[in-house]
Image (spheres, rainbow, N blue to C red):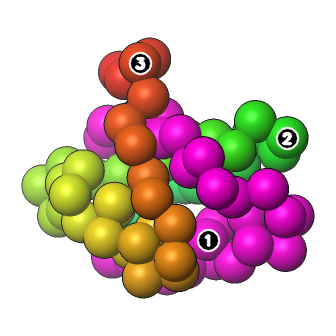
C-alpha cells in the first residue's frame, strides 16, 4: 500500500470535495480517501500494483480539478 497527499487548489466547496472522494473510492485499487476540509487537500491510500499517481490525478481531473502531488509523500 502507498499513501500520498495531493493538493487540489481549486476545490473549496464541501460538496465538490465529497464528490471527488466518492469518485476516488470507486476507483479500482484505492483503499482509503481522506479529505482535509478547508485545506483543499486529499490523502489517498492505494495499491500501487493496481494504479499509480498519474491515474489518481486523472480521476480528480475528470471531476474538473487539478491534483498536485503534495510534499509529504510516503
Q: On the rendered structure, is 41 left or right of 44? A: right
Compare marks 3 and 2 and give the one earlier in the sequence.
2
Is residue 64 left or right of 53 when viewed as pictured? right
Residue 43 relative to residue 70: left or right = right
Location of residue 8 in the rendering, given as x and y in whole percent from the top left corner: 56, 49
Q: CA distance from mark 1 to mark 2?
A: 14 Å
How far is disc 1 from disc 3 in space, using C-alphas?
20 Å
Name the residue at 34% across, 60% down. Answer: 57
Q: Is residue 24 visible?
A: no
Of pointers 1 and 3, the one earlier in the residue sequence:
1
In-front residue for pair 12/17: 12
Q: Mark 2 packing: few (<14 Cα in 10 Å), some, or many (20+)?
A: few
Q: Which residues are magenta?
A: 1-28
Q: Is residue 26 magenta?
A: yes
- Residue carrying label 3: 71
Relative to residue 66, is residue 73 drawn left or right? left
The picture places residue 50, in percent across and down from the top left corner, at: 17, 64
Residue at the spot 75% in from the left edge and 73% down from the top edge: 16
Is there a contact, CB below 8 Å, between mark 1 and mark 2?
no
- Label 3 and label 2: CA atoms lie apart by 18 Å
> Foreground residue, 3 or 60?
60
Q: Which residue is mark 1?
A: 20
Q: Is residue 40 above or below residue 28?
A: above
Q: Which mark is residue 38?
A: 2
User: Splitting the image into 4 quarters, where does residue 62 fall?
Assistant: bottom left
Q: Residues within 10 Å of mark 1 (few under 14, many from 20)?
A: many
Q: Is residue 26 visible?
A: yes
Element marked by disc 3: loop
* 74 in relation to 41, above or below: above
Viewport quadrant of the C terminus? top left
Amino acid at each position: 500500500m502507498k499513501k500520498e497527499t495531493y493538493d487540489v487548489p481549486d476545490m473549496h466547496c464541501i460538496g465538490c470535495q465529497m464528490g471527488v472522494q466518492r469518485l476516488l473510492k470507486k476507483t479500482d485499487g484505492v483503499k482509503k480517501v481522506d479529505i482535509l476540509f478547508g485545506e483543499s487537500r486529499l490523502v489517498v491510500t492505494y495499491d500501487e500494483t493496481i494504479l499509480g499517481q498519474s491515474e489518481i490525478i486523472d480521476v480528480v481531473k475528470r471531476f474538473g480539478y487539478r491534483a498536485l502531488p503534495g510534499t509529504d509523500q510516503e
